[in-house]
Amino acid sequence: MRRLRGRPSLRAALTLERGERVLATAPTRGGSHVATTTTALHIPTPEGGFTRIPWERVEHATWKDGWLHVTETSRAEHHVRLTDPGSVPETVRERVTATIAVTHQAALPGGGKVRIAGRRPATGGDVRWTFVFEAGLDPSDPGLRAQAEQVLEDLRRQTGL
């Protein structure tokens, strides 16, 4: 595990929130670093800065053949080549898993399926809900969205979230 001690340029480049601590870092092929913290994943940008992705906004992350692949709940994707991953892949998995309060897949009355995930921010607070619709369904369709919202209301009643 790499720590930011002794890396003042990296430490200065990261925008950490109050109380946020670095857990692990890994060098990238482009000469930057990926940093995992108690509340977010920090991925380098082509401009030399970092994109901060709170753990509860990571929809999916995989580690394969030296690449860290991350999909956000907004569907934005990031692909970073790590030269020495250290504990970054394991830390990503653990932190993302820790935010999940509930997941539920349901058939929609009009056809198709939706996966609903409720995630609690690492900093605490209310559960944030996301919908992932089956391929071929239009998530911007108001009728489809209303069906998913009804499934969510039922799920919230069942779970107390």
Image: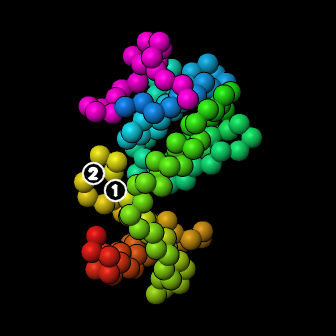
Residue in view at x 45 percent, y 69 percent: 103
Q: Nearer the viewer, residue 16 or 45?
A: 16
Per the image, label 1 sits on a secondary structure element best described as loop
Please tell me how many numbered marks the rendered image carries: 2
Q: Is residue 113 magenta?
A: no
Residues drawn in magenta: 1-20
Q: Is residue 160 left or right of 83 when viewed as pictured?
A: left
Tag on residue 156? Answer: none
Instruction: Tell me the amino acid under the disc marked 2.
Output: Gly
x, y percentage for residue 137?
A: 54, 71
Q: Secondary structure at mark 2?
A: loop
Residue located farthest toward the right when viewing the structure as drawn: 65
- In depth, the one of 45 and 86 nearer the eye is 86
Instruction: Give the overall secondary structure of the magenta segment.
Output: loop
Residue highlighted by disc 2: 124
Instruction: Tell me the residue at 46%/20% (across/down).
Output: 4
Amino acid carrying mark 1 in the image: Arg
Q: Which residue is mark 1?
A: 120
Magenta span contains residue 3: yes
Q: Residue at x 40, y 55 (%)?
A: 99
Report how far apart the C-alphas of labels 1 and 2 lie in the structure.
Answer: 6 Å
Residue at x 42% of width, y 19% of height: 11
Q: Residue furthest front?
A: 1
